[in-house]
Protein backbone atom coordinates (compact mmCIF):
# COMPACT_ATOMS: atom_id res chain seq x y z
CA UNK A 1 0.00 0.00 0.00
CA UNK A 2 2.88 2.39 0.79
CA UNK A 3 4.31 1.90 -2.70
CA UNK A 4 0.90 2.46 -4.29
CA UNK A 5 0.40 5.73 -2.37
CA UNK A 6 3.92 6.86 -3.25
CA UNK A 7 3.57 6.28 -7.00
CA UNK A 8 0.05 7.76 -7.03
CA UNK A 9 1.37 10.89 -5.30
CA UNK A 10 4.30 11.15 -7.72
CA UNK A 11 1.95 10.89 -10.68
CA UNK A 12 -0.37 13.54 -9.25
CA UNK A 13 2.57 15.87 -8.63
CA UNK A 14 3.86 15.44 -12.18
CA UNK A 15 0.44 16.15 -13.65
CA UNK A 16 -0.12 19.26 -11.53
CA UNK A 17 3.35 20.64 -12.24
CA UNK A 18 2.76 20.25 -15.99
CA UNK A 19 -0.27 22.59 -15.92
CA UNK A 20 -0.37 26.43 -15.93
CA UNK A 21 -0.57 27.90 -12.43
CA UNK A 22 -4.01 29.47 -12.98
CA UNK A 23 -5.44 26.13 -14.07
CA UNK A 24 -3.97 24.55 -10.96
CA UNK A 25 -5.47 27.28 -8.77
CA UNK A 26 -8.92 26.79 -10.30
CA UNK A 27 -8.65 23.02 -9.82
CA UNK A 28 -7.70 23.58 -6.19
CA UNK A 29 -10.65 25.88 -5.57
CA UNK A 30 -13.02 23.32 -7.08
CA UNK A 31 -11.48 20.58 -4.93
CA UNK A 32 -11.87 22.80 -1.86
CA UNK A 33 -15.54 23.38 -2.64
CA UNK A 34 -16.09 19.63 -2.93
CA UNK A 35 -14.22 19.07 0.34
CA UNK A 36 -16.51 21.57 2.07
CA UNK A 37 -19.49 19.31 1.35
CA UNK A 38 -17.77 15.97 1.91
CA UNK A 39 -15.55 16.71 4.93
CA UNK A 40 -18.21 17.22 7.58
CA UNK A 41 -15.77 17.10 10.52
CA UNK A 42 -13.55 19.96 9.34
CA UNK A 43 -16.57 21.92 8.04
CA UNK A 44 -18.08 21.82 11.53
CA UNK A 45 -14.78 22.90 13.09
CA UNK A 46 -14.51 25.86 10.70
CA UNK A 47 -18.11 26.98 11.19
CA UNK A 48 -17.80 26.58 14.97
CA UNK A 49 -14.57 28.63 15.09
CA UNK A 50 -16.03 31.37 12.89
CA UNK A 51 -19.21 31.47 14.96
CA UNK A 52 -17.21 31.83 18.15
CA UNK A 53 -15.29 34.79 16.76
CA UNK A 54 -17.87 36.56 14.60
CA UNK A 55 -21.34 35.65 15.92
CA UNK A 56 -21.89 39.24 17.10
CA UNK A 57 -20.85 40.73 13.77
CA UNK A 58 -22.01 38.31 11.07
CA UNK A 59 -25.09 36.22 10.33
CA UNK A 60 -25.06 32.43 10.15
CA UNK A 61 -25.35 32.69 6.35
CA UNK A 62 -22.30 35.00 6.17
CA UNK A 63 -20.29 32.72 8.45
CA UNK A 64 -21.08 29.66 6.34
CA UNK A 65 -20.10 31.57 3.18
CA UNK A 66 -16.75 32.51 4.75
CA UNK A 67 -16.16 28.87 5.73
CA UNK A 68 -16.90 27.71 2.18
CA UNK A 69 -14.54 30.29 0.69
CA UNK A 70 -11.94 29.23 3.24
CA UNK A 71 -12.12 25.63 1.96
CA UNK A 72 -11.76 26.88 -1.62
CA UNK A 73 -8.68 28.89 -0.71
CA UNK A 74 -7.08 25.98 1.12
CA UNK A 75 -7.60 23.81 -1.94
CA UNK A 76 -6.01 26.54 -4.06
CA UNK A 77 -3.05 26.81 -1.68
CA UNK A 78 -2.32 23.09 -1.51
CA UNK A 79 -2.54 22.57 -5.27
CA UNK A 80 -0.48 25.69 -6.02
CA UNK A 81 2.17 24.61 -3.49
CA UNK A 82 2.73 21.49 -5.59
CA UNK A 83 3.03 23.59 -8.75
CA UNK A 84 5.26 26.25 -7.15
CA UNK A 85 7.77 23.59 -6.07
CA UNK A 86 8.71 23.26 -9.76
CA UNK A 87 8.85 27.03 -10.39
CA UNK A 88 12.06 29.07 -10.55
CA UNK A 89 12.56 32.15 -8.37
CA UNK A 90 11.69 34.39 -11.32
CA UNK A 91 8.50 32.44 -11.92
CA UNK A 92 7.62 32.62 -8.23
CA UNK A 93 7.84 36.41 -8.45
CA UNK A 94 4.96 36.40 -10.95
CA UNK A 95 2.57 34.99 -8.33
CA UNK A 96 4.11 36.17 -5.05
CA UNK A 97 5.38 39.52 -3.77
CA UNK A 98 6.92 40.68 -0.50
CA UNK A 99 6.33 44.11 1.03
CA UNK A 100 8.61 45.35 3.80
CA UNK A 101 11.63 43.17 3.07
CA UNK A 102 13.85 46.23 3.30
CA UNK A 103 13.30 46.16 7.07
CA UNK A 104 15.43 43.02 7.30
CA UNK A 105 19.16 43.62 6.73
CA UNK A 106 21.31 40.53 6.31
CA UNK A 107 24.00 41.73 8.71
CA UNK A 108 24.24 43.69 11.93
CA UNK A 109 25.99 47.07 12.08
CA UNK A 110 29.26 45.32 13.01
CA UNK A 111 29.04 43.03 9.97
CA UNK A 112 27.91 39.88 11.82
CA UNK A 113 25.44 37.56 10.11
CA UNK A 114 22.09 37.99 11.78
CA UNK A 115 19.02 35.81 12.33
CA UNK A 116 15.39 36.87 12.11
CA UNK A 117 12.25 35.15 13.37
CA UNK A 118 8.96 35.26 11.46
CA UNK A 119 6.11 34.38 13.84
CA UNK A 120 3.36 34.00 11.32
CA UNK A 121 0.38 31.78 10.95
CA UNK A 122 -1.50 29.85 8.32
CA UNK A 123 -2.53 32.87 6.26
CA UNK A 124 -2.89 32.96 2.48
CA UNK A 125 -0.41 30.69 0.73
CA UNK A 126 1.61 29.76 3.81
CA UNK A 127 3.63 27.24 1.77
CA UNK A 128 5.34 30.12 -0.06
CA UNK A 129 7.23 31.03 3.11
CA UNK A 130 9.84 28.51 1.97
CA UNK A 131 10.61 30.78 -1.01
CA UNK A 132 11.13 34.05 0.86
CA UNK A 133 14.91 33.97 0.39
CA UNK A 134 14.31 34.90 -3.26
CA UNK A 135 13.01 38.26 -2.02
CA UNK A 136 15.23 38.88 1.02
CA UNK A 137 18.88 38.35 0.02
CA UNK A 138 21.44 37.08 2.48
CA UNK A 139 19.20 34.68 4.34
CA UNK A 140 18.48 30.99 4.26
CA UNK A 141 14.91 30.02 5.16
CA UNK A 142 14.44 27.64 8.05
CA UNK A 143 11.19 26.16 9.36
CA UNK A 144 9.79 23.27 11.34
CA UNK A 145 7.33 20.66 10.13
CA UNK A 146 5.53 17.57 11.34
CA UNK A 147 6.32 14.41 9.40
CA UNK A 148 3.59 12.29 7.86
CA UNK A 149 3.07 8.60 7.24
CA UNK A 150 3.99 6.49 5.39
CA UNK A 151 7.72 7.37 5.49
CA UNK A 152 8.18 7.09 1.73
CA UNK A 153 5.43 9.63 1.13
CA UNK A 154 6.95 11.85 3.82
CA UNK A 155 10.29 11.84 1.98
CA UNK A 156 8.54 12.81 -1.26
CA UNK A 157 6.76 15.76 0.38
CA UNK A 158 9.95 16.79 2.20
CA UNK A 159 11.90 16.85 -1.07
CA UNK A 160 9.20 18.96 -2.70
CA UNK A 161 9.13 21.46 0.17
CA UNK A 162 12.92 21.90 0.28
CA UNK A 163 13.56 22.28 -3.46
CA UNK A 164 14.61 25.93 -3.00
CA UNK A 165 17.40 24.98 -0.57
CA UNK A 166 15.54 25.94 2.59
CA UNK A 167 15.97 23.90 5.75
CA UNK A 168 13.15 21.92 7.38
CA UNK A 169 13.41 20.22 10.76
CA UNK A 170 10.86 17.88 12.27
CA UNK A 171 9.57 19.68 15.34
CA UNK A 172 9.50 16.42 17.31
CA UNK A 173 13.07 15.29 16.65
CA UNK A 174 15.01 18.15 15.06
CA UNK A 175 15.47 20.60 17.95
CA UNK A 176 19.25 20.19 18.17
CA UNK A 177 19.74 20.56 14.41
CA UNK A 178 17.61 23.72 14.45
CA UNK A 179 19.69 25.21 17.27
CA UNK A 180 22.91 24.42 15.38
CA UNK A 181 21.59 26.15 12.26
CA UNK A 182 20.57 29.24 14.23
CA UNK A 183 24.01 29.36 15.83
CA UNK A 184 25.59 29.71 12.37
CA UNK A 185 23.62 32.88 11.63
CA UNK A 186 22.03 34.10 8.43
CA UNK A 187 18.78 32.22 9.11
CA UNK A 188 15.23 33.40 8.59
CA UNK A 189 13.25 31.15 10.93
CA UNK A 190 9.53 30.82 10.24
CA UNK A 191 7.36 29.57 13.09
CA UNK A 192 3.61 29.11 12.64
CA UNK A 193 2.24 29.85 16.10
CA UNK A 194 -1.49 29.61 15.41
CA UNK A 195 -1.70 26.04 16.69
CA UNK A 196 -2.64 25.02 20.22
CA UNK A 197 0.25 24.30 22.60
CA UNK A 198 -1.25 22.89 25.79
CA UNK A 199 1.96 21.21 26.96
CA UNK A 200 4.20 24.20 27.69
CA UNK A 201 2.27 27.17 26.34
CA UNK A 202 0.67 30.16 28.05
CA UNK A 203 -2.97 31.21 27.86
CA UNK A 204 -3.36 34.54 26.08
CA UNK A 205 -6.28 36.31 24.37
CA UNK A 206 -6.83 35.68 20.68
CA UNK A 207 -9.96 36.73 18.80
CA UNK A 208 -11.80 37.37 22.07
CA UNK A 209 -11.00 34.07 23.80
CA UNK A 210 -8.05 32.65 25.68
CA UNK A 211 -5.90 30.32 23.57
CA UNK A 212 -2.80 28.31 24.41
CA UNK A 213 0.18 30.09 22.86
CA UNK A 214 3.74 28.84 22.43
CA UNK A 215 6.71 30.62 24.02
CA UNK A 216 9.09 29.32 21.32
CA UNK A 217 9.49 32.51 19.21
CA UNK A 218 10.53 34.61 22.19
CA UNK A 219 12.78 31.94 23.69
CA UNK A 220 14.64 31.47 20.38
CA UNK A 221 14.78 35.20 19.65
CA UNK A 222 16.27 35.97 23.05
CA UNK A 223 18.74 33.08 22.87
CA UNK A 224 20.05 34.05 19.42
CA UNK A 225 19.53 37.83 19.73
CA UNK A 226 16.96 37.94 16.92
CA UNK A 227 14.32 40.43 15.95
CA UNK A 228 10.76 39.11 15.65
CA UNK A 229 8.34 40.03 12.85
CA UNK A 230 4.73 38.94 12.31
CA UNK A 231 4.26 38.87 8.52
CA UNK A 232 0.83 38.13 7.04
CA UNK A 233 0.30 36.53 3.62
CA UNK A 234 -2.78 37.90 1.82
CA UNK A 235 -4.54 36.59 -1.27
CA UNK A 236 -4.78 39.20 -4.03
CA UNK A 237 -6.62 37.08 -6.58
CA UNK A 238 -6.46 33.76 -8.37
CA UNK A 239 -2.94 32.34 -7.77
CA UNK A 240 -1.71 35.73 -6.50
CA UNK A 241 -0.42 36.46 -2.99
CA UNK A 242 1.54 39.14 -1.16
CA UNK A 243 3.46 38.86 2.11
CA UNK A 244 3.28 42.02 4.20
CA UNK A 245 6.07 42.45 6.76
CA UNK A 246 5.25 45.07 9.36
CA UNK A 247 7.36 46.68 12.05
CA UNK A 248 9.41 44.42 14.34
CA UNK A 249 8.08 43.45 17.74
CA UNK A 250 9.64 45.36 20.63
CA UNK A 251 11.87 42.98 22.58
CA UNK A 252 12.96 45.50 25.22
CA UNK A 253 11.43 48.34 27.19
CA UNK A 254 13.39 50.92 29.17
CA UNK A 255 16.57 48.93 28.53
CA UNK A 256 15.15 45.69 29.94
CA UNK A 257 13.78 42.54 28.36
CA UNK A 258 10.02 42.55 28.02
CA UNK A 259 8.08 39.68 29.56
CA UNK A 260 7.37 36.70 27.30
CA UNK A 261 3.62 37.15 27.91
CA UNK A 262 3.74 40.79 26.74
CA UNK A 263 5.67 39.97 23.56
CA UNK A 264 3.41 37.05 22.66
CA UNK A 265 0.34 39.22 23.36
CA UNK A 266 1.62 41.75 20.81
CA UNK A 267 2.18 38.93 18.31
CA UNK A 268 -1.33 37.57 18.89
CA UNK A 269 -2.75 41.06 18.39
CA UNK A 270 -0.98 41.37 15.02
CA UNK A 271 -2.25 37.95 13.91
CA UNK A 272 -5.77 38.86 15.04
CA UNK A 273 -5.65 42.01 12.92
CA UNK A 274 -4.69 39.81 9.96
CA UNK A 275 -7.64 37.51 10.59
CA UNK A 276 -10.12 40.35 10.87
CA UNK A 277 -8.90 42.07 7.71
CA UNK A 278 -9.82 39.01 5.59
CA UNK A 279 -11.55 36.25 7.60
CA UNK A 280 -11.54 33.69 4.76
CA UNK A 281 -7.74 33.97 4.55
CA UNK A 282 -6.93 32.07 7.78
CA UNK A 283 -6.82 28.36 8.69
CA UNK A 284 -10.23 27.90 10.35
CA UNK A 285 -10.27 24.10 10.02
CA UNK A 286 -7.99 23.75 13.06
CA UNK A 287 -9.32 24.15 16.60
CA UNK A 288 -7.18 27.02 17.87
CA UNK A 289 -9.02 27.19 21.21
CA UNK A 290 -8.38 23.77 22.69
CA UNK A 291 -8.48 23.58 26.49
CA UNK A 292 -6.82 21.12 28.83
CA UNK A 293 -10.10 20.05 30.41
CA UNK A 294 -12.08 19.90 27.19
CA UNK A 295 -14.41 22.72 28.27
CA UNK A 296 -15.17 25.77 26.04
CA UNK A 297 -12.47 28.48 26.12
CA UNK A 298 -12.84 31.42 28.47
CA UNK A 299 -13.93 34.72 26.97
CA UNK A 300 -11.22 37.38 27.13
CA UNK A 301 -13.59 40.31 26.68
CA UNK A 302 -17.04 41.08 28.00
Image: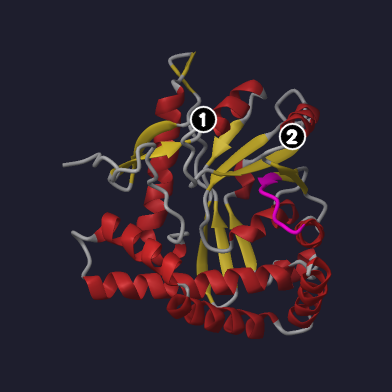
Indicate the secondary structure of the residue bearing disc 1. Answer: loop
On the image, the x and y values in percent for residue 149 come to 72, 57
Region of the chain picked out in magenta, as a range:
143-150
Whole-angstrom CA distance, mark 2 to mark 1, is 16 Å
Find residue 253 and report its image quarter. Answer: top left
- In the rendered view, does 208 fall on the left or right side of 124? left
Q: Quadrant of the N terminus?
A: bottom right
| Mark drawn on residue 55 | none
- In the rendered view, does 84 fall on the left or right side of 296? right
Identify the residue at image location x=78%, y=33%: 177
The secondary structure making up most of the magenta span is loop
- Residue at mark 2: 178
- In the rendered view, does 58 fall on the left or right side of 291? left
Residue 298 vs 21, above or below: the answer is: above
Identify the residue at image location x=59%, y=69%: 77
Inspect the magenta stretch and tell me whether residue 283 lies in it. Answer: no
Q: Earlier in the sequence, mark 2 or mark 1?
A: 2
On the image, the x and y values in percent for residue 221 come to 60, 28
- Residue at mark 1: 215
Inspect the magenta stretch and tell me whether residue 147 lies in it. Answer: yes
On the image, the x and y values in percent for residue 138 come to 78, 43
On the image, the x and y values in percent for residue 293 come to 35, 37
Q: How many marks?
A: 2
Q: Nearer the viewer, residue 29 or 226?
A: 29
Residue 260 vs 154, above or below: the answer is: above
Residue furthest out toward the top: 255
Q: Nearer the viewer, residue 84 or 300?
A: 300
Residue furthest out toward the front: 1
The answer to whether marks 2 and 1 mark residues whose Cβ atoms lie closer than 8 Å is no
Mark 1 Cα-neighbour bin, 10 Å: few <14, some 14–19, many ≥20: some
Amino acid sequence: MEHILYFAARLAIKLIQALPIRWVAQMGRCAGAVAFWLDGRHRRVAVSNLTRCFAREKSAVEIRAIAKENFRRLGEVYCCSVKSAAMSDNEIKTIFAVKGGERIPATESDGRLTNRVFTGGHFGNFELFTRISAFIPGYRCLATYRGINPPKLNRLVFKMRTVSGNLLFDRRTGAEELKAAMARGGMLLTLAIDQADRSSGIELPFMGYYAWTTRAPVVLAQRYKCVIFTPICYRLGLAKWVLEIGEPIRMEENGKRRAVEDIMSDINANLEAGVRSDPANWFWVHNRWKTKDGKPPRAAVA
